[in-house]
Amino acid sequence: NTVFQFNYSNSTDDWSIHGNSGGKAASTRSHNHLKLFELAETLNFRERALDPEHPNTLQSRHSMASGFYDMGRVQEGRSAFEDTLRFRERVLSPEHPDTFDSRNNLARGYYNLGRVSEAVWLHEETLITRERVLGPEHPDILHSREFLDAATAHWEIINHNDRRSDSGTEL
């Protein structure tokens, strides 16, 4: 069982709860922090009450990973999505729609961490499998294409700039 330990009082956002008028940004951080705490509590409860591999527990695991992303904690989100993807592939199947969502979000994490070539590869794999399983007209295909297009465009810019740097051309 994965148990998330979450000590709110030791949080870096704790100051925003105790009357510091940090404005809207502080309020948003505070809200996101509370949301992450609630997601962790739900996940811990579901792992105990249901099973670590129950579909509802897997959804909580996915939501927890998304919560890390929302807090700007991309490295933790990426790690949580990798775990969630492994569970979903084993329990639901590699071709289940929820597994596609985890794969897509993991690719977004790779992208946000600068691991663009990995993001492109994972977005491509997700799109190909989604089209085969769900059909080319399914609404989720559009989202996969949009993510793939954005990652590919960024990857091409990086490669173009790398080629220019290697040839000695000023950028």
Image: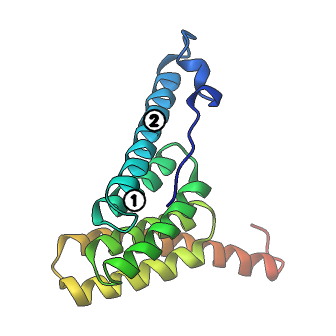
- Mark 2 or 1: in front is 1
The answer to whether 151 is drawn above or below residue 30 in the figure is below
Residue at the extreme right: 168
**SS category of the residue bearing label 1:** helix
Q: Which residue is mark 1?
A: 62
Quadrant showing the C terminus? bottom right
Q: Is any part of residue 147 visible from this angle?
A: no
Q: 26 and 170: which one is in front? A: 26
Secondary structure at numbered mark 2? helix
At label 2, which amino acid type do we have? Asn
Q: Quadrant of residue 135?
A: bottom left
Q: Sequence-wise, which precedes: disc 2 or disc 1?
A: 2
Please identify the quarter of the rendering in which residue 48 is found.
bottom left
Q: Which image quadrant for residue 117?
A: bottom right
Can residue 61 be seen by looking at this rendering? Answer: yes
Left or right, 28 with reference to 113: left
Which disc, if any, is residue 26?
none
Residue visible at 35% across and 59% down in the picture:
57
Residue drawn at the location 48% of the way across and 64% of the way down: 81
Q: Nearer the viewer, residue 76 or 134?
A: 76
Q: Residue furthest left?
A: 137
Between 115 and 74, the residue placed more toward the observer is 74
Q: Report the amino acid beneath label 1.
A: His
Q: Position of residue 20 (x, y in %)?
A: 58, 11
Label 1 CA crowd tier, 10 Å (few <14, some 14–19, many 20+): many
Left or right, 19 with respect to 127, comes to right
- Please give the residue where the numbered disc 2 appears in the rendered image: 32
